[in-house]
Image (spheres, coloured by chain):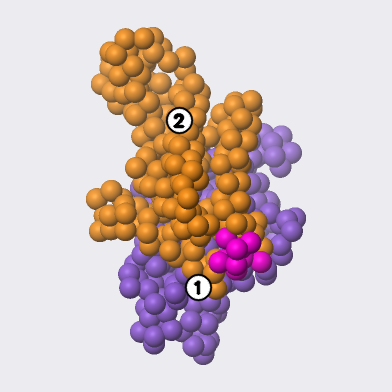
Chain colours: A orange, B purple
Amino acid sequence: MSNGTTSRRDQIRIAAEELFRTRGYLATSMRDIADKMKLSGGGSLYAHIAGKEELLWEIASDAIEAFFAAQMAVLASDLPPVEKLRQAMIAHVTVIMSRLDAAAVYFDEWRHLGDARREEFAARRDEYEKRFELLIHAGVACGALNAPDERFATLYALGALNAIRRWYRPDGRLSPDQVAALTADAVLRGLIG
Amino acid sequence: MSNGTTSRRDQIRIAAEELFRTRGYLATSMRDIADKMKLSGGGSLYAHIAGKEELLWEIASDAIEAFFAAQMAVLASDLPPVEKLRQAMIAHVTVIMSRLDAAAVYFDEWRHLGDARREEFAARRDEYEKRFELLIHAGVACGALNAPDERFATLYALGALNAIRRWYRPDGRLSPDQVAALTADAVLRGLIG
């Protein structure tokens, strides 16, 4: 595939991500995506991508791999359990803040994938989230965290982290680093008490 | 309006809420709602309701009033600031857990309202959320909470509370009271540290 083609494909993905977030997957047509890119019609998109669900799948897969990559770097470190959890949380929200459009697909629009892909996505996301549960478990096991219900603690932590995508704006008062640190610290304090 | 008519209208609302949550507002037709109610066709619904956006508005308005009513009961109490905040958070998540379908409209599907109603809804929700900020401010002012950034603290708290609708199931391991108390306490600890 030539560089030109790769770049056009990326442009399509970026336009689709934004439309999927702002209008939702169901309300977005291939024509809308072409219009956003100022192409003459939806038809020319099909030289680059098989269809709308293909785009949804590409965005969802790409997002989950970004979360895994960020998490992996932390898991590979030598940090003590609670600091590892803290860094994993910071890495997680940093991915969200740097890819707000893709995050909308990761959290909401993925449910419009076809059955097989939807199951594959859900299984991969469960695998990713399970590692947070293991980090919390390690923190409890070494006595640094006090989370009598580790499953609840995991759901609470991920929910609190994921919620920032609803209000974080790149041009807002707080920098991504500030939001990440404030959020991770608030979650951690919630798991210590 | 006769009781029979009222009851049919409630049945329509309940069917619509469930479809709006599971499929999304855009992917739900009046015909789908009629089918769910095992009516012969979408046509007969129009004797009871002006249209799909009317239903969305009714569900959204009803949900926000439920949140306000639950909050009002707590605000009217004589509790000290932090306990008042804790009770307001418990009241908030209790409304979510008791009305998961309507919560999907309150948090997501409301954006498909027409412009005027969408603005009205957003303003009313801001008003509701502002009261959480005032409760947090009162807790900081009396020295019981330590939230240097009260706006962030409010967004964090509401985000963490609202996230439970993504995993809470009525037939789950934890009772609504347990989920409410665990969540409110985790958020509060996050605002103390």
Check disc 1 and report its element: helix, strand or loop: helix
Amino acid type, residue under disc 1 in the picture: Arg
Amino acid type, residue under disc 2 in the picture: Asp
Quadrant of image for the C terminus of chain B:
bottom left
Q: Residue at x 71, y 62 (%)?
A: B174
Quadrant of image for the N terminus of chain B:
bottom right
Question: Picture coordinates of residue B78 (x, y %)?
Answer: 51, 90
Mark 2 crowd level (few <14, some 14–19, many ≥20, 10 Å Cα): some
- Residue annotated with mark 1: B189
Q: Which residues are magenta?
A: A139-148
Question: Picture coordinates of residue A144 (x, y %)?
Answer: 55, 66
Instruction: Determine which of the numbered discs, if any, sits on residue A56 in the image.
Output: none
Q: Quadrant of residue B143?
A: bottom left
Question: Picture coordinates of residue A14 (x, y %)?
Answer: 34, 29
Q: Quadrant of residue B153?
A: bottom left
Check disc 2 and report its element: helix, strand or loop: helix
Residue closest to the eye, B10 or B70: B70
